[in-house]
Image: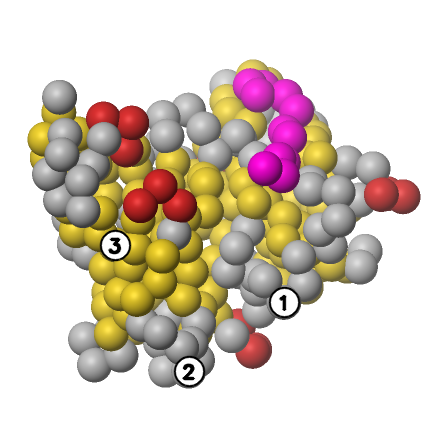
Amino acid sequence: TQTVSQSDAHVTVFEGDSVELRCNYSYGGSIYLSWYIQHHGHGLQFLLKYYSGNPVVQGVNGFEAEFSKSDSSFHLRKASVHWSDSAVYFCAVRGYGSSGNKLIFGIGTLLSVKP
Amino acid sequence: GPKVLQIPSHQIIDMGQMVTLNCDPVSNHLYFYWYKQILGQQMEFLVNFYNGKVMEKSKLFKDQFSVERPDGSYFTLKIQPTALEDSAVYFCASSLPGNYAEQFFGPGTRLTVL
């Protein structure tokens, strides 16, 4: 059974701060990991993904995430946030092989960026 | 970038009625999905669909649910009959073959069952 855990329900930072949103997963096989952003009242927008290779992946709008097999983590980071980054961020794992093509999402982390 | 459209954005119906949610996926995508999000909760997978067939469905995809995409038109989710617990936002998504981790989502249809 695959699970995704996002330990922080709500993170508040000031504009220009750096931020890290945490994601831990449990899955025994090869997986895809991804992050999505959801602005209020909108659908999810893809940010980045990891499957193999360089554990640090770059995404849109200055976001990056680092995969760690030993920690079972895929934390999302941004060096300097903007007020427009305020949104809910979802970490997701895609089961590979017999699990099909569904995405399993974490509960989400609400990022609030104060001016 | 590529967009997934969903019609309508809101739907209010009485319990027991039928409802059809419509999705216009990205034009060259071949995999289609429906997810359900109850207010304040995480997004949950309902079903995926490829080549005219359901590939996988979750336990949330009750017998009252059905999906189809007749002749390349809208990808639809039909609920017949609806129940109070079907009230949620339903998101459609699509993806290219081999790129399942990168799904493109629509803005959602908010369904309220009274």
Residue at screen point 36% across, 82% down: A28
Amino acid marked by disc 1? Gly
The relative height of residue A70 versus residue A20 in the rendered view (above or below) is below
Subunit of mark 2?
A: A
Residue at screen point 17% across, 51% down: A20
Q: Is residue A42 left or right of residue B29?
A: left
Amino acid marked by disc 3? Leu
Mark 1 to mark 2: distance in Å? 17 Å
Q: Is residue A85 left or right of residue B45?
A: left
Look at the image and give the residue range highlighted in magenta: B1-11
Reading the chain from its start, which is encountered first: label 3 or label 2? 2
Depth check, mark 3 against mark 2: the one in front is 3
Depth check, mark 1 against mark 2: the one in front is 1
Per the image, the residue denoted by label 3 is A76
**What is the crowding at mark 1: few (fewer than 14 residues within 10 Å), some, or many (at least 20)?**
few
**What is the crowding at mark 2: few (fewer than 14 residues within 10 Å), some, or many (at least 20)?**
few
Q: Is residue B44 magenta?
A: no
The dot on residue B62 is none
Residue at screen point 44% across, 80% down: A30
Subunit of mark 3?
A: A
Per the image, the residue denoted by label 2 is A29
